[in-house]
Image (cartoon, rainbow, N blue to C red):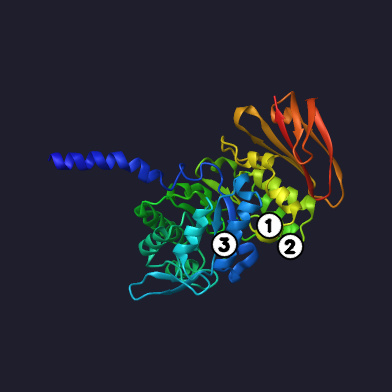
Amino acid sequence: MLKVIRALLLTALFMPSLLLAQSSTLAATPPMGWNSWNLFAGRVTDKDVRAAADAMVSSGMKDAGYIYVNIDDTWQGERDAQGNIQANSKFPDMKALTDYVHSKGLKIGIYSGPGAQTCAHYAGSLGHEAQDAKTYADWGFDYLKYDLCSFRKNMMEEAPNDPAKATQMMKDAYAKMQKALLATGRPIVYSFCQYGWDAVWEWGPSLGANLWRTTGDINPTWDRMTLIGFSQAGLSKYAGPGHWNDPDMLEVGNGKLTLDENRLHMSLWAMLAAPLLAGNDLSKMPPETAAILTNHEVIAIDQDELGKQGDRVSAVGPVEIWAKSLKGGDKAVALFNRDDTPLPVTVKFSDLGLKSAKARDIWQAKDLGKLDGSYTATVPRHGVVLLRLTK
Ligand code: GAL
């Protein structure tokens, strides 16, 4: 009897920490790091990941708060006779790689999915969830992106005319991996990637999601980046410490985005309290790109401890004003211009619940002094004026 009581007490003692292992103690602020997909896609190698870790330190990204170096799809090889997943020849020694990344004071992430195959047709975790989670933990991974991909086929085959059953299958698949990750005892950030289906923001957190993709894939174009970013209006109530909306990884420094477009992208993601996962080649990063990614005042908005996602205050034609509450009563306010020409934009403080405020223009790194009633700025085409207001 005593033994049973002791066991029960021990379970009660350790349960909360187990339950928390995939929640608010991890990702207390939106995860920051780098992911291989946006630039390297299927070509990523061990060497690229090491170079990204090196550059994360030498470029100042690490000092700015970027910690996770995440391997996306295409690392997987065959399973061995016992069913253990092995890396392919692009990743000769996963343990040595995670040791290397950890030796830089960084953390490292890996990728899989609940289906038989990933999106790039490499081995997924179907039927091997517990085994794979244990392998990731043994290798030393700190983060898992779990991508629905071919599991959609299973859903369509098993529940062709039954959307409720299909949704339940998907939830069960994500829950299965949550259980497997918890069983490893290693804190592993759990990142859902199922493109925002079935309002994942409503149920993802209860299945241990530290972040969940809210949309399909981003690409480094003005149209796609803004379509995704501005479509996040209304989702703010679902985010908070330990669980974040993820409008996909950053394209800052990729494609042909201009300086103003990159600044708008970074500002919008910061206003959204979005995970900041750079997707550019850190080892060949021009100073303008580094300056955007490492701007500590913009990062402070994203990483604000209050953990409140910002939301839209107004949208009139191509002009949008968004606000985000910050710890201590400050507010971040973004004046966005989606038009092809510069435009004057006025923010009325009464719309923010303020009469007057001390303001700072963050990208100009300039204090604007005390402002009364409103503020008007000329916002560049495809650009932003980002303000921090203090009462
Ligand atoms: C997509 C996912 C991308 C990337 C890719 C890899 O489904 O949204 O972010 O992970 O798969 O194949």
Which label's residue is closer to the chain start, 3 or 2?
A: 3
Q: CA distance from mark 1 to mark 3?
A: 20 Å
Point out the frontmost of discs 3 and 2: 3
Tell which of 251 and 287 is nearer to you.
287
Q: CA distance from mark 1 to mark 2?
A: 8 Å
- Image-quarter location of ligand 1: bottom right
Q: Which residue is mark 2?
A: 255
Nearer to me, 257 or 212: 257
SS label for mark 2: loop
Amino acid carrying mark 3 in the image: Arg
| Residue 149 visible here | yes
Residue at 74 percent of width and 58 percent of height:
223
Q: Is residue 274 visible?
A: no
Say which quarter of the image contains residue 378: top right
Rounded to the nearest angstrom, the CA distance separating label 3 from label 2 is: 23 Å
Q: Residue at x 65, y 39 (%)?
A: 301
Q: Residues within 10 Å of mark 2 (few under 14, many from 20)?
A: few
Q: Is mark 1 within 8 Å of ligand 1?
A: no
Return the mark for residue 50: 3
Q: Nearer the viewer, residue 95 or 333?
A: 95
**Residue 284 x %, y %:** 70, 61
Is label 1 in contact with label 2 (beta carbons under 8 Å)?
yes
Give the secondary structure at mark 3.
helix
Q: Position of residue 20 (x, y in %)?
A: 40, 43
Relative placement, left or right, of 133 versus 351 is left
In the rendered image of this protein, does residue 57 appear above or below residue 308? below
255 is higher (above) or lower (below) than 20: below
Counting other residues with Cα less than 10 Å from the Cα at mark 3, is it few (<14), some (14-19), or many (20 or more)? Answer: some
User: Which disc number belongs to residue 153?
Assistant: none
Look at the image and tell me in which quarter the N terminus lies. Answer: top left
- Looking at the rendered structure, the kind of residue marked 2 is Gly
